[in-house]
Image (cartoon, helix red, strand yellow):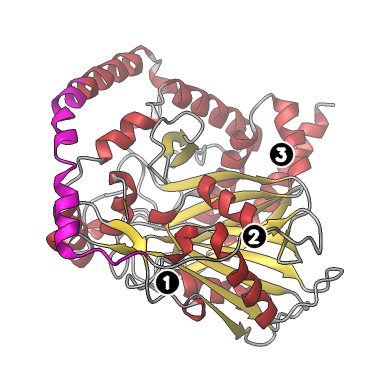
Amino acid sequence: MERLSGYDSTFLFFETPTQHQHFVGLTILNPDTEGANYTFESFKAELQRRLPLVPQFRKRVYPVPFNLGRPVWADDPNFEIDNHIRRIQAPAPGGRRELAELAAAAAGTPMRRDRPLWEWLLVEGLEDGRVALIQKYQHSMMDGFTGSQIRFHMCELEPGAHKEVPADTWKPEPTPTGRQLLLGSLRSIPAKLRFFALLIATVRILAAGSVRRLRTPKAERISMKAPRAPWNRAISAERAVSFVKTDLAEVKEIKNAFGVKVNDVVLAVAGGALRRYLEKHDALPDLSLVAVVPINGHEVSQLEEVINQNGVMRSTLGTDIADPVQRLHRVAESTRRAKSAYVGIDFLLTWAEYFPANFLNLVTRLVSSLRVADHIPMSGPQNLTVSNVPGWFAPLYTFGLRIEASYPFAQVMHGNGLLAAVLSNNGDMDWGFIACKELMPDIEELAESVPLEVAELLSAARALA
């Protein structure tokens, strides 16, 4: 039995029938890989064989009675592999549109809490003969970094490689009783006595941040208010997704030509795509959109028991700038300043230990049921999240099938009904966009604009040579 951290727990308490807290990965697999011999049954059998490598796959969440403490992970005595992997046929003609609709349907379907919080869906019948794997995980069990660790156990660097797996001797531990759950939550009370010391540290950090902001020239500050975009409203349960592939070498060429970071190029391209979308829909605000950008904190955090260790910074996307090069430089300056003001991940995760579960759950449900975001700008100082996750730089195979693309789709929230994520994949950059379908039914326009934005920046970069 393992208690969830305060931060990991929030992904359970923030979940409502319309605000799902899981993310989805869409992986395109080639069944014609040498030596693969793909069948659904062989794929499922290999997943079953590798379960000892990922113990979390057989654990479920047990809430503390009355939400008087953080829930725990414990073995699911009723675990059945057939509850977590299934196959479907793609609707004809099995193209990108049909695949996007299947991924969106998976993203818009809640996950059952009475079993481990993950699902795999194998999609057959695609028009190019490929197979798609739609993977779905509740965010409380992993973030982008821990997801890459699971990928390590499920993938190989060579086709036909046989991963060594220890013998499966798993026997479920006893199911925790309500009394055990309550008593366990009481043991965490002494740790909460550090609250006042944390409060003092918070005041100091906020004061230092205010001083730093006042010393920054006004023209260079990231606004503490973000303009309202069409997706900054209350969300419904349905999702829409789109995806596209770009060349990582081209992005690096742009990066080197202008002396910026890969992440700066990603943000500038996203800003350009959003500008095109908003101009087409006559909704481009005078002020730039602002993005929340997750930062991997696993390398610096000392809190090993926390699964999700993503910090965040804020950056302008330069949507108010027509010239793509000027936009890129503006974004690069914004991220440089944001990093200098970044607050340590352990500080943020420690604060999460004090979030009262019942209060979070109540507020979240009220915000959702009353559609508060339709009346109050809940997006705060940001409009959306843009995430860039490092992937892998060599051909990768899962259960013998070559991975040809891997598109990420994370969760959207009330007031922030759009998210963009990028995952590098063997020389490619795989872009995934997800939104509330009610607010952005035409999300494919964003994916279509990404290659155009990369081409403009690449042309400008080569003109410097």
Mark 2: few/some/many CA within 10 Å (<14, 14-19, 20+)? few
Residue 354: x %, y % from top left:
20, 40
Closer to the chain start, of discs 1 and 3, is: 1
Residue 38: x %, y % from top left:
75, 77
Mark 3: few/some/many CA within 10 Å (<14, 14-19, 20+)? many
Residue 330: x %, y % from top left:
55, 29
- Give the quarter of the image for residue 271: top right
Residue drawn at (38%, 41%) of the image:
305
Closer to the chain start, of discs 2 and 3, is: 2
Residue stretch in magenta? 173-200
Image height of 286 relative to 205, above or below: below
Q: Is residue 43 left or right of residue 180?
A: right
Q: Quadrant of the N terminus?
A: bottom left
**Mark 1 element type:** loop
Cα–Cα gap, marks 2 and 1: 34 Å
Cα–Cα gap, marks 2 and 3: 46 Å
- Give the quarter of the image for residue 351: top left
Disc 1 residue type?
Gly
Foreground: 350 or 104?
Answer: 350
Tell me how many marks there are: 3
Q: Which residue is mark 1?
A: 108
Q: Which residue is mark 2?
A: 165
Q: Mark 1 or mark 3: which is in front?
A: 1
Disc 3 residue type?
Leu
Is residue 357 visible from the viewing direction of this image?
Answer: yes
Foreground: 135 or 68?
Answer: 68
Q: Which residue is mark 3?
A: 457
Foreground: 54 or 149?
Answer: 54
Q: Is residue 213 left or right of residue 386?
A: left
